Structures are given as C-alpha cells and as structure tokens.
Amino acid sequence: MASNQSVLTVENLQAGYGGVRVLHGVSVNVKERSITVLLGTNGNGKSTFLKCLAGLLKPDLGSVQLNHDGGSIELAGKGPPEIVEAGLSLVPEGRRLFPMLTVAENLLMGAYRKSARKRQRENMNFVCGLFPILEERKRQLAGTLSGGEQQMLAIARGLMSNPKLLLIDEPSLGLAPIIISRVMAAIKELRDKHGLTILMTEQNLPQAAKIADWGYIMVHGKIVFEGNAQQIHDNELVRKYYLVG
Amino acid sequence: MAFDLVLESIATGLLVGGFYAALSLGLTISLGLTDIANVAHPAFIFLGAYLALALSQAFHLDPIVSGMVLVLPFYFLGNALYLFYNRAFERRGESSLAGLVLFFGLLILLEVGMASEFGVGLKAIYSPYGSVALNIGPLSLPLRFVYSFVAGVAAVVLLQLFLTKTFQGRAIRAVAQDAQALSLMGAKPATVKLIATGVSMATAALAGGLILAVGPISPYQDRLLIGRVFAVVVLGGSGSVLGTLLGGILLGVSENITTIYLGAGWSLAVSAVILLAVLALRPSGILRR
Amino acid sequence: MLEVQGVSKSFGGVKALSNIELRLEKDERLGLIGPNGSGKTTLLSIIAGTIGSDRGRVSFKGRDITSVSPHKRAKMGIGRTFQIPRPLTSMSVVDNVIIPLMFIRGLHRKELETKSVAMNILSQVGLSTKAEAKPKELTQLQLRKMELARALAGEPELLLLDEVLAGLTSGEADEVLDLLRVLNNDGIGIIMVEHIMRAVMTFSQRIVVLDFGVKIAEGSPSEVSTNPEVLKAYIGE
Amino acid sequence: MKRSRAPLYLVILLSVGVALPIFFKQPYFYFASYIVLEYIALSVAWNLLGGYGGYLNFGTSAFFGVGAYASAYIFNSLRLPVILAIPAGGAMAALLGVLIGYSTLRLRGVYFAIATLAATTLVQSIVLNTPALGSAVGLYIRLPPPPPPYGNLIELLFATLFGVTVVSIALSYWVENSWIGRGLMALRDDEEAAETMGVPTFRLKMFANVLSGFLMGLVGAFYPLYIAYMEPYSTFDLGISFNVFVMTLIGGTGTWQGPVIGGLILGTIQQAASVTITSQYNLAVVAAAMLLFAVLAPGGLKGIFSKFITSRAE
C-alpha cells in the first residue's frame, strides 16, 4: 500500500515555549499513502510537534521538508496559511471548530485554500459520505454538536482543504470506543480508497496500531522507538511508557 | 385621531429603524466581529455625508447614489485605518481598550476637520422627494424615510449574504471566534480583519448618503448618533447584522412613541436609556439567548 | 473540607461538566486526571469561583460557597495556580506576591514587613533572586514558581494546582513535588490537575478521572490505573 | 521618610495657593489659571479609575456637569448657602458614578467607556428638558459678593479650587500607595488572577469610580460661580471629557504625577492658544498630539521623564 516515496521528512526538530525546550531533536519520516502514528502520553510533546509542522509554533532548529511532484518545499519557519497552501492540513488538538458557525459553514471554512475552493462541492459530498451524521446536522451550530460529532467535523474540515498530507492531533480524544472505531475506520478508508497520507498522534495504542503502517513513540520530546504496528505492539517499552510515563 | 398618530409614529419608527440599521452596520462588524470599538464610526458617517454632499452638488447626483459612489473609496479608507490600528496597537498586544484612544482621537480630529472645511452651519441638498410623502390609508410616510429604509434593509440583506455565503465573509465571522484555527484554514487573520474594517467603513459611506437624504447636516451632529448606534448594536447583539435591523426598529419606534408622549426633547435620551438598561440587564443583547 | 455536589456546566451548548461529585478531606492529596478537554480546568475554576456552575453546589469547610465571589473564596482559604501562568505584568515578582498578602492576609499597613514576608515565600519556592524582576523576564519554570508563591502567600487550606509541573524537567518536577509534600504535611489539602502520570500517580492519595465532563473513576492510584473504564479512556482497550 | 514629609509639603502648597490671590492681583491670571487648575483636578480624578484600574471614562463632562447643575440649583434656585451646594454637587456626581458603575463595571472595559458616553447624552437631555434647570436657554447665576480678604470672586474661586486640586492630588497619592491602588493595578493587569489573589475587583472599581466621580462633581460645583451663565451644550461638552482623557494620557496614566504634568502643560498651552488661535483648532492640535503619544510613547511624558532619569542614573 504505502509507497517508498517520502511525503514528509522532518529532521532534528527542536522547539519549545519561552525558554523551555519541549522537542529535543525529533526526526520523522512519512511515506506516501501511509498512516504514520506518533504515540505517547500527554505532555511528551506530540501536540507541540504537530504545531511546528503546521506553523503555529516556529521551531528553533531543524527542517521540515514537504516533498511533492519531484520537488520539495521547506516548511520550517513558514506561517500556517502558507503551509496550508503547500498542501498540509492540521486537525488541531481540542478540535478548534468555530462554535457559532454552522456545520456546513465550518466545512466551507476548511475549503478556504485557493485550490480547494473549486472542489468544494465535490469534497463536501465526499466528507458527508464519510461522516453521514454531518449531512444531517449541516444547519446546526458546530458548538451544539456532541464530542464525537465535533471530532468528525474537525477531520472533515481538515479534508476540505484537499490536503496532500493530513495531520490529526489525537483523533480518539474524548470519544466513546464505538465512535473511535468509526473514526479510525474512516481514517483507514482515506488511505486505502483515496490514497491520502496521514500523520496522527495518539495515546490510544491498540486502535491506532490496527490501522498504522508505521509508528513512532515519543517520550519527553524524543523519539525512543520506531517500527511497524506489530513491532510496536510487542515492544516492552511501550507498555512501560503508558500510565507510568 | 390619537390612535392614528400612534400608528403613524410606529410606521415612521419602523422606517427610521431601517435607517438606523444602516448607520449601525459598520459598528456591529467592527465591535462584534473584529473587536475594534470604533467610537468614531458616527464621525466617519458624517465624513461620508459631507463628501456625498460635495459629490451631489458637483454632479447633480441623488445623495443616496453619492453615498454608493463613496463605498469603494471608504473601503480603502477602512483598510488604511486597520493597517494603522494593527501596527500601532494590535501587534503590540494591546487590547481593544487601547484602541479606543485612537478612535476617540479620530472622532475629534474628524469633527474639527469637517467644521473647518465645511463650516459649522447646516447644509442640505435639494432632492425631488425631500418633502413628498407616501400616503397609505391613514398613514402619511415621508418618502425620504421610505427610501432610506429600503436602502438600509438592502444593505443589511447584502451584508448578511456576504457574511454567510462568501469565503471572506465567513472568515470575518470566524476570526473573532478562533483566529488561530482560522489560520489553520489558510486565511491570514490580519488580512481578514483588514477586509472587515474596509467593509465596516464602506457602510459608513452609504450611511452618510442616507443621512444627507434624510435631512440637513452639520458637524458635531455625529455626537447625537454615538448613543444611538451603540444602542442598536447592543440591542441586536454585537456582531449580528440582522440584529441591527431589529435593534434599529426597536429604537426607532421607541423614539417616536417617546416623542408623542413626552415631547421631542426626550428622543435623544431614549437610546441612552436603552443602552444603559441593556448593558445592565442583558449585556449579550436582547436577541441572543 | 471541600464538597462538590452535582455540578454541571456547559458553554454555548457544549457540556463541559455533567453532574460532578467530588469530596476532599482536610490535608488530602487528590489527583484530577483525564484527557485534554475533559473538564478538569473548568472544575478547578468552578471550585475557585471564577466560573459559575449551571447546576449543583460547592461547599467549603461546611459552608455553601456556590454563590460566593472568588476573592472571598480566596480569603476563606482556596488558592489556585493557572494552567498558563497569569502574572500581573506591570508589577515586579515580589509585588505579585504582595498582592495576596495585602488582600487575603490583610498585611497592608507595614510595607517593609509585608515585603519581608513576601521575600520569605519567594525563597521558599527558590525565586528570591528574581524578586525585583518583571514577569516577562522570567522563564516558564520561574513563572510557575511565582504562581505557586502567590497561591501560598494567601495561606490556603486548599490548593488547586493546574498543571503546575508542565514544562518542567523531571528534576525540577521532583523539587516542586517535594515542596508540595511539605505543604501538605503542614495541613494543606491539594487538588492537582496533571498530565505527567508518574508524578500524579505517586503524589496523590486518591485519583479522580474525568472523561468528557463525566467522572468515570475514582480510587487509589493503583485501583485507577487498572480500572477498565480508565484504560478505555486513555488507551482505548 | 518621604511619606512623613508629605503632609508638610501639602500644608505649604495649600497656604501658597490660598494666600497668593491676597497678595498678587492680576485678574486675567486667575481666570486662565482657574481653567488649568480645573483640568488638573479633573485629570487627577480621571486617573483614579482610568489610570490605575484601566477602565476608561469618556463621560467626564457628565460628572462635571451634574456637579455644576446640582450646585447651581441648590444655591441659585433654592437659595441655600454655597458652602452646602459645593459638596452636594460632588455627591450628585458620585451618585451618577454609582449608577453607571453598578450597571457596567462588571462588563468589559469597552462597555463601561460606551456607557459613560451614553450617560453624558442622558444627563444632558434631562437638563434640556427641565425648566427648573434652565432647559436649553440656560441659567443666570446670582453671584455672591466675595468675602474678605479676597477682593474679587475669581480670587476666592482660584484659592478654593487650588485647595480642591491639592487635596485631589493628595488623595491620588494616597490611593496609589495604598492597598486600594495596588488592587486596582492588579485588576488592570488581569482581573481573574487578581480575584483569585483576594482582590475584591468590583468593589475597588466602584470605589475608584465613585471617588473619581465625586471629585469631578466637586470641581464642577464651582463652575457656575466662575462662568456666571450656564447652558447644557457647553457644560456637557464632549470636548471636556476628551481634554481630560488626553491630558492624563499625555502626562502618563497610572501615576499621580502624570495627570498633574499633563493638565498643567496642556492646559497652559490651550489657555495660551485660545488667545491666539481659535478653540476649534486647539482641540485638533490636542487630538493629534494624543495620537502621536498613544503610538510613540504609551507611557506619556511621565514615562519619558522617568526613562530619562533612570538612563542618567545608570
């Protein structure tokens, strides 16, 4: 499934907040048409890492290369709008929907990117097919959705920008297990049927392992282990870092 | 007879309400959607009115048409104003409260500028419908108010469509809710606010044309509007375009009824009382749940 | 000492907390955990009084404080720190600590005395060298220590700590935890919201787990870490 | 040390101001200085809430005007002694402060600012519609004869307003250095954090607003005696509010010296300018100066001054 072409190459990324270093030289590689998962409990720097990729936080050091159509673009240091234009879309931690806009309007906000506007109708149909509940709730204010619905809307909104690479920060956060399975199935479908490349962070190891092609484990801002789903599942360290991290 | 009078004042109040909505549109955008408390908005409306007067006199245009002509220049004026505000205050991380300093200063500068440029006396433009009334049954409605009502409602509808149906319009509504999330959609929050301030100022041009159509103007009259536009915006719920229409009508009708029972001298107090009462009781506006 | 009964809160239609029950005995150490967005900070704010609840009541030391303003709660002995430090930016570090001394403990008559009390508290948290600095010159760790010093200045009986260890190295975190243990030995009850599991599991006597605004588990650290509901929320099994 | 000498300075300053008109006779000087003093006192009062607490009052003229009309009504129409009318003017303005403060000081600062603007319109409308207050026609004030040792009413007014100004400055100094000022500055920085540190934010804002309103009303209460004829448009003029706001801002908000420096310098320039150029333009000059200061020197003259001092000391 996953090709050998890298879509994203992150090297030695270092970043932090106000003098406190959170990421200590993180290197991650994301292959085309793959699901790559970054595992670790809260407070280990996963969200900070995604924020750096999306431009919400300027890294202190390191490079973020987005490779596409033979060429590659350096994203480190660029602002979020430029990064979105380049084809990378982040579904942020805490969903960050626009609560006073309707579901449909939130989706259309996702299609703000110039090249995505032309395909808004097509993409809208696509995400509503993926998450039929959104079709039903189109006219409802986003703030009034349940948690699971909000997470689906957030992913759907990220897809509306027609990204080359979709970053998802903890898709299972705060969701009931049955909903998690549905969200994970949708993410898998995005890769299998639509060839999308996905990088997501997760605490939810088994669910993520089911669909991931490759995983990294991050502890205190460093990658301590990488491998395929089976290797991660069998690794002793993994158990240790959960709950006792 | 007394009943007819009340009915007529309600009908006129309704018409005035549409006019008030047009005056308040710009403020509901700046205060409600971009968190810029532009107290100078009424002064900009009068700037629009004076420029419309000059245009109408030079090219024999209808004042409302002159106001429309000024919409585009005022849009750019708004852009410039935002750039200045952004550089001088917003980027330094200073609150909207610090911005009040700027707008209070602009208010005074504009007033003095207009007084010295156009004189302190009343100025008016002749329009063929200036003293004509539309008679519907027992009602006699001044045509200039009918036109300004129509223009006001049209502006409300257009703006509502802009804010709900276009990418930029939705971004303007989103920027106050979560500017960072907006940047993740690929929009630059500062650019979105630049456009919003332009649109806000553009409505001042139209409102200026309407004011000129409704009656004679003089500098410093903008002070009579400050309380009114804030009352309309707060009544309708800050940031709600349709709310300005309802807020405007409520204010217009209340003023007219007050005039009948207490006399014209009290009409200015109505908006002040409404504003203070709404702030004290329901600061989010009466139309919001 | 603290009792939260049936507290619910929603923001614009989104339920942040539903029907939360929580008790804290005098000098108990309670850990409040849960995924991001599960309502932990909201619960702390409701206890501190800066956010009002839609339903339910909060009592402290046997008194119903549901409608008591936050500054009065601070006087009654509820101290808190913020998830993102909120320094008073125009004042020096020592002046930041003087504010609660003046307003909670009423030390506003003798300036020099008040200042020396403030300096004592700053040295207790290891920040005395930065006393005259402005908050913007501080690092994240120092800001967190200043927040802690401010909370301690009010001589609280209950301390609400919102991710006080975030961004700290494990050595620094241990330092802060040691300090908290000393305070707890002096009889201060502590509610700690924390993401660093190792810290919260070893520090707390009892753990409450929130998930999506609902309390899904409560018990000793070992009970909670084997609770299936919790594993589901955290690991998804 | 510094504090223990403050009362001495205060007494010396007061005696100078009170004694000056007895020995130095120059009517125009007092007419002009009166206005400067008025602006200093109003700016000092404004600074109590606006400078320390960060809540901007755009309705200084409302408080000033309420004080003026209340005192005029009491001694002019009710024929009660002036000595009663002056504090009554302050009290009425304080009451206005209670009303506005109670309804809007819980909201964001922007709404308080707007409410003070609306309050100006409201009290002006009330005066315009009340014949007992002269409506739009205005009130002619029956001026009392000046008591000795002052030979002239303006000399007495200067002396008393001087006293009020000095007392206002002293009050402001006291607020700044007491727990009240500390609390106000704390809430200006972060209201929620201040609350959790035990600062009764609403009560402090109310206190500052009411004290500030009282002082503005007190200053206003002398105005009918100075002007001899009052009408609502100039009494409630937005220009007064604007001047006060700008003087404090240019002098430097949040310190007791700022409004004194701003009021003294700008007030004097304005008085000099009103002789040479029209009052219309001098308001524009003030507005332009304010914008420059707001953008380039947010700390005001006081800030520039103290920066200069510290850089020299280093």
Image: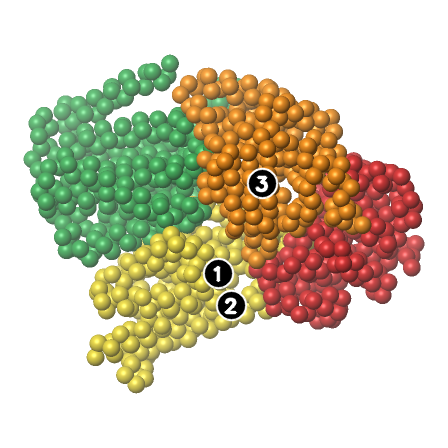
Chain colours: A red, B yellow, C orange, D green
Q: Is residue D244 left or right of residue A219?
A: left
- C-alpha separation, residue under disc 1 versus residue under disc 2: 23 Å
Give the letter of the chain under mark 3.
C
Give the letter of the chain under mark 1.
B
Residue A68 x, y percent position in the rendering:
84, 56
Residue D261 x, y percent position in the rendering:
35, 31
Residue labelled with disc 1 = B289
Q: What type is the residue that disc 3 sits on?
A: Leu
Residue depicted at 73% across the width and 71% down the height: A125
Residue labelled with disc 3 = C44
Residue depicted at 21% across the width and 79% down the height: B1
What secondary structure is found at the residue carrying circle 1? loop
What secondary structure is found at the residue carrying circle 3? helix
Q: Is residue D225 left or right of residue A62?
A: left
Let me know if residue A39 appears in the view. yes
Residue A241 x, y percent position in the rendering:
82, 38
Residue depicted at 64% across the width and 56% down the height: A97
In this orientation, which residue lies closer to the viewer: D113 or D41? Answer: D113
Q: 10 Å neighbourhood of mark 2: few (<14), some, or many (≥20)?
A: some
Quarter of the image for residue C223 reads top right
Residue labelled with disc 2 = B159
- Discs 1, 3: same chain: no
